[in-house]
Amino acid sequence: MLVLGIETSCDETGVALYDSKKGLLGHTLHSQVKLHAEYGGVVPELASRDHISHIIPLIDQLLKNQSLQIEAIDSIAYTSGPGLSGALLVGSCVAEAMACSLNIPSIPVHHLEGHLLAPMLEQESPSFPFLALLVSGGHSQLIHVRAIGNYSIIGDTLDDAAGEAFDKTAQLLGLGYPGGLALSNLAEKGGPFFTLPRPLLNSHEFNFSFSGLKTAALTLIKKQKILNESIKANIAYEFQEAITDVLVKKSFLALEHLNLNQLVVSGGVGANKKLRKKLTQLSSKNNFKVFFPAFEFCTDNGAMIALAGALRYHLSAKNDFKYTVKPRWRLSEIDSIF
């Protein structure tokens, strides 16, 4: 079965082809980072318009790259939520229109489920059950993944997500938007000269809280009489250490609590090199396996949606060609749209 995956939940237009027997055949992606950079964040109206401009050319290019005709597609998976309403509507309308014209099933996909399953695109992938650490600009969650569609959130952010804290602190340091990667790169030039708090590090719960850390970073920045590149690097270093310390410890405690030996790390922050290094080192010492998506599949992409669609085809495929988007859609309510 050949599945076309479409992702338009925010500021990335992604399409991909996934074959249930051969795996991922190809994917194409258009990023809107430059479009939104001057505004310091995503502008929903601009995002929607940009998706409209690029989605059909991307699909055409993807099919051309694989020397396939559109009639070869057996089903179409698309992100139905959560995300920006207008952006989601672009992808859902295109997907359902194509499904109708080709008379094939469509598969609405939960965006976070796509991230959870993204490591399964790799040659070495996890098996059910496993623990997932989902860390991005909008989410910081620990999720017990038992099977496709069977998820329990055991830890969540009480305020800011890890990726949001990265981006906002990067802006405080004058690194622009999006700043997560820039902050991580700057941190490589810094060292342990400052101390920032590790929120909830020693609590016996699995929730996260990063707003206090962001405020502490702001206070530290304001205390500096001279904020040169060296000082910025040292602040970035300590900030990254603080966030990754919390993420790593909470993940390990959750693994022990659930008696699991597989950890999946996904979402944009899953590309953070320091986080990957700490978790890999911890896994080798404590007899558990950790799985990461390829760097290109940590951020939003069509490949993870195509995969999720293929895996939940028998659960969610439909032929009514009606489109529904859920901008606010909790993972615990994943079956509510079907």
Image (cartoon, grey):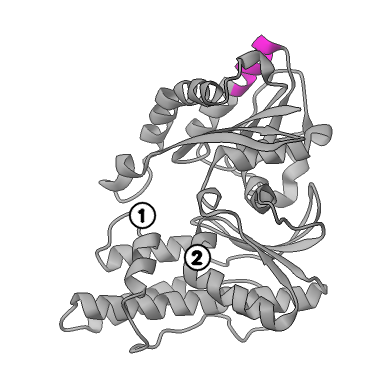
Q: Which mark is residue 265?
A: none
Q: Residue 101 occupies which quadrant of the picture?
A: top right
Question: From the viewer's perspective, is residue 301 above or below residue 159?
Answer: above
Amino acid carrying mark 1 in the image: Pro
Span shown in magenta: 95-102
Amino acid carrying mark 2 in the image: Ala
Judge whether residue 98 is colored magenta: yes
* Residue that numbered label 1 is attached to: 178
Q: Main secondary structure of the magenta part?
A: helix
Residue found farthest to the top: 101
- Residue 39 at x, y = what percent? 28, 46
Q: Residue 164 occupies which quadrant of the picture?
A: bottom left
> Does the rendering let one see residue 192?
yes
* Residue that numbered label 2 is attached to: 162
Q: For the residue carrying disc 1, how many other residues have a C-alpha within 10 Å: few (<14), some (14-19), or many (20+)?
A: many
Question: From the viewer's perspective, is residue 101 above or below residue 231?
Answer: above
Residue at 75 percent of width and 58 percent of height? 126
- Residue 185 at x, y = what percent? 35, 67
